[in-house]
Amino acid sequence: MAVRNLVINDPVGIHARPAAMFAQAVTASGQTVTIAKEGGNAVPAGSILSIMGLGIKQGDTVVINVEGDNAEAVADSLANILVNAE
């Protein structure tokens, strides 16, 4: 299992486009992935609606959990999507 904690820097937080890109990458990875606001409940990261439902804003810390083969590389790739989201 791999865990990544990252702060969202995008001024509008995680909106539809980065949520969709993230969810598609999760699905393509074939891994079990969850995402949560720090201290909140984790949701399936392959669901755009679940991600949007978290209401992640600029400055929020999110926690990504990846389970499965190659979890470390997948977690790095997914974290990169959110860090570079526009």
Image (cartoon, helix red, strand yellow):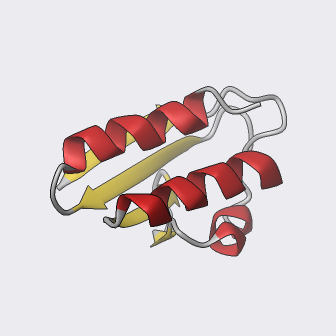
Q: Residue at x 15, y 58 (%)?
A: 69
Judge left or right: residue 31 versus residue 50: left
**Quadrant of image for the N terminus:** bottom left
Residue farthest front in this picture: 28
Residue at 68% x, 33% y is 85
Q: Is 18 placed left or right of 11 in the picture?
A: left
Q: Measured from the top left, where is residue 12 in percent x and y?
A: 84, 37
Name the residue located 53 percent from the left edge and 69 percent from the top edge.
46
* Picture mark count: 0
Q: Quadrant of residue 9?
A: top right
Left or right of 58, for residue 33: left
**Residue 40, above or below 10:** below
Is residue 61 among what the camera can see?
Answer: yes
Above-or-below relation of 11 to 36? above
Q: Where does residue 32 sit, x and y in percent of width and height?
A: 32, 69
- Estimate the x, y position of residue 17 in percent, counting from the top left: 78, 49
**Location of residue 47 in the rendering, given as x and y in whole percent from the top left corner:** 60, 72
Which residue is painted at 51% across and 46% down in the image? 62
Quadrant in which residue 34 is drawn: bottom left
**Which of 44 and 42 lies nearest the eye of the viewer?**
44
Q: In this rendering, does residue 7 appear at all?
A: no
Please determine whether, in this image, residue 29 is positioned above or below residue 77: below
Q: Quadrant of the C terminus?
A: top right
Looking at the image, residue 75 sits to the left or right of residue 83; the answer is left
Question: Which of the pair 50/25 is nearer the observer?
Answer: 25
Residue 66, picture quadrant: bottom left
